[in-house]
Structure formats: C-alpha cells, structure tokens
Amino acid sequence: MCDYSYILGLPAEVRLLIYNQIPQKELVHNLRLVCKQFRAEIDEMCSFHVDLDDRKHCWERVLQLRIRSCKILHFLRPPPGGPGTTILKHPYLLRTLKITEHISPSNLYYLLSDCCRSLGELRLHIGFNLLGYEFPPLSTFSFERLQRLEIIVSTVGSSSSDAFPFSPFINSAQSKVVQGIFTEFLLNIFKLLSVFKIQIRCFGFGQVSNFVASVLVFLGSHSGTIEGFDFELILGHGLPSAEFQPISETELERIDFQRIRNLRELKALRVVSSSPIGVNLWIDLVTQQVNLNFLEVDLFPANCSIFRDVINRNCGSLVSVEITDLSVWDEEGNCSPFDCTIFGGCLNLKKLILDRNVTRRRMFDTAELINLFNLPSSLDEMALNYFNILSDELILFTNSESGQNIRTLYLTQCGNSGLYGVDGTVLERIIELPKIHFIEISPLNFSDPEEQDKLNIILDTFGYSENHSYFQLTKTTHEFPISLNVFSIDSESDDEEFMD
C-alpha cells in the first residue's frame, strides 16, 4: 500500500503545485478519493474546466468542484438540492460558461442567477427549448464582468450536432416568444461587452427582419466597449423572393443609426448573411472601420470597389482578410478585375481568402484577379476561389517576394483554360516555392498536350493516377526547402518530403 504521509507533510503551497501538474480526470476520479484531506484540499484549492453531462454517473460530484470553466452538454435533471436551489457549490468562481440546447429552462435560469456576477464569457443557445417556461425578468441578472458573449438563436430544425433539434413546422407565435427572450437578454447585458458573436438560424423573411432589427438596436445601444462583432445569418432555403419583408418602420425608429456609425474602431469584424435584409447597413458598418485586425465579409454579391477603401483605410492593422461573393462583373457585362495591389501596404497581413461570386459566367481570356505579385511578403496563407487568373499572373506571383514566403496555398477553379484549371508549368513553380508547406489545387488543366505531359509527370511523382484532376501535398519536414525538378528526378528523396 502506498504511503502518502510524506505528501501530507509538505507545505500547502507545494501540494497545490503538485495537484496542478496532475490531469483533472485523475484528480477527480482517483486522487480525490484517497483520503478526506486530499478531497478537501482538491475541492478548495484547485480550479477545474469541466464538461457537465447529467447522463453520466458522476455528474453530481462535478457540481461540488471549484469550476472555473464549464461546458454544459446535457442538463435536464433537477439539481441535487431540488429545483430552485444553488446548482454549483462555488458559483462565484465560474468565469466561462458554454451552454448547448440540452438544458432545462429552470436549470438555465438558476444557473445564470447563481453565476452571472462572475461570468466573463458566456455562450448560449436560445430556441424552442425555452418555450413554455415563464422566465422572471432577465433584468434581474447582473452581468458585472461579462465581456464576451456568443448567442445562437434558432427557429428552425437542423441536422447539425451544434444546432437545435427542433421541428421545422414553426408558427409565428412561437417565433415571437424566442425573439422576445433574445431581445430582452441583449438589452440587459451590453454594458461591459467587448466581443459579441451572434448566429441566427431562421425560416421566413419576417423572422429575419425582426432578428436583424434586434441586433441593430443592440449595436445602437452599445457603450463604446465593443472591439469584436461577429454576425451570421442562416436563412431557410427555397423562400420565394415575393415574401421579402424589409425592416419595419417601427423597428427602424428603435435603431440609433448615429451610434452605429460611430462604431468605427472594431478590431475584429465578421458579417455573414444569406439575406438581403439590412445588407446596406452591414456594408456601412464594414466601410466605416479604421482599425481592423480581422475582417470576414460574406454578403450578397458585393462590388470590389466597396472593399478597396476598406483595405486602404485599415492597411496598417489588418492581419487576416476573408471576402466572399466578390463581384467583378457589372450588369452590362463589363469586368473590373480585383487588383491585389491594394494589399501591398498591409505589412502585417498573414491570411488572405478571396472568393468570387459565381452567378455570372466567366470568360477564358478575361483576367479577374491581377497583380498578385504585389501582395505583401508577410503573407503566410492564401486561398483564391473561382477567379479567372492568367497563368502568367500565377507565374509572376511565384517569382515575387510574397510567393517566395507563402506557406499555405489553396487554388479552386483559378486557371484560365480548360475547366479553369492550373497547368503543369504553374504547378511546377508552386511545388518549388522555398517555404511552401501545404498545397491544394483543383482542378488541373489537361487541355494542352504539352502541359498534360508535365502534369502527369508531377502526378506520377507524388503517387497520383494519370489525369487526376485534384492535387494536394503536405510537406512533412521543415528543415529544408523543397528542391524538386520533376523532369530530372534521380532519387526518391524529394518524394519523401511530401505526403498525400
């Protein structure tokens, strides 16, 4: 039998250091059960990050711990002390709380009541799991330290494991209840918030208008502390455009547009919407920013000119840019190619993703993305999707300083011949880039016989079948740059630097 007396004789500070080196699972399930002193000290001295699931036999024991971060996977049973009792033994220690849809309304309410004063980060699902329960006013919650809030609000069913398993047959009355809970919650937590993330899943233009208005009312009521805003709207498919409903005049009157216009110094901004409702307001929010580090935009087809000013205004601070649904063609069929020279001054840019809107047919001889060689040398990862890029443009990029420093490269339908594929000469240049770590290119262009031969030599070198249209390589070592001439391979050593 092990003798633990020497550990018990150590100073309490030393024992705490020992406890902190032991995995949480071992502390709870093994060491905590050794003796009463170990159990008391672990409960009082250690802080835990736990997943709570009341379907597991030890869930009641978890509530007794000093929980600092908690993700609730399933919590439908009443707490050990019965409904309305304190759920956590040490609610004042909780800093991060993430709640899925599998929680009863009463457990949710009393859990938030217990820990609202100490929470710094909250992730919450609001949906039909909360219907049929009469909440006391949410203004009774006092979120004194909450700085980061993530809300998923849903009025539709979804097959996603991260979504609500609700029936898609939803009436307007139920939708209004969900919206009411959502709106009241927003209006009572904005005081100290610095990061706000909201995802809305709904079915029907009327629901969209109401939810978008609630978010805009929230932004118009902010206290100037918000540094990061993330908005994602997922609209049900197949809705007839005739049912489009703009934001009502009553809702517009509640929105403080002047304060939204003053929200100019966000550090992180993400706006993804599959609805035209409020699109001009979102574009205004994007274009007025002056200090962005992270930008991701996916709205209805947006003209390239919108983003030129945004990039120039934030060039000194941008670290990551992702723009989806870029439109380079006007209604008259004229092309205004996206000029990557605008990123030349973004000396801190590490990640760039550009995604062209694909609703308009492309022309093989028209360049839609130009001056890639002017991209900054700081760029580490780049993904280009659905642009018509001339082969000469891609070759110039591989010769540029930015190309020589790139580590991760994705090209999807970005050639200028065949089915918009990349030819053998371009692929060879990309493989030989000195710092490249990961390559994903689809498709390859086999329309030219000479380029087809080059491609098949490369494909055979890396174990692909002849005329394979998809190409992916991952470098497995970092010590040496790639040195590969696919037309004079003497050994298998180069082949071993990559793996599929």
Image (cartoon, rainbow, N blue to C red):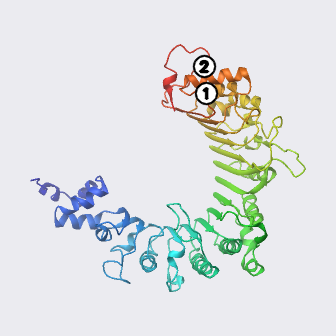
Q: Residue 99, percent across and down?
A: 46, 68
Circle 2 SS class = loop
Which residue is located at x 53 percent, y 13 percent? 490
Q: Amino acid at mark 1?
A: Ile
Q: Residue 51, percent across and down?
A: 38, 63
Q: Which mark is residue 486?
A: 2
Placement of 177 over or under 365, stated as above or below: below
Circle 1 SS class = helix
Question: Sequence order check: which comes first, mark 2 or mark 1?
Answer: 1
Residue 291 visible in the shown view: no
Q: Residue 477, percent across and down?
A: 48, 29
Which residue is located at x 26 percent, y 56 percent? 26
Q: In the current view of this chain or complex, which residue is farthest to the right?
A: 332
Which residue is located at x 56 percent, y 28 percent? 464
Q: Which mark is residue 431?
A: 1
Q: Amino acid at mark 2?
A: Val
Query: Which of the two marks, 2 or 1, is nearer to us in this view?
Result: 2
Do the CB atoms of the residues marked 2 and 1 lie less than 8 Å apart? yes
Placement of 411 over or under 447, stated as above or below: below
10 Å neighbourhood of mark 2: few (<14), some, or many (≥20)? some
Q: What distance separates the C-alpha of mark 2 from that of mark 1?
A: 10 Å
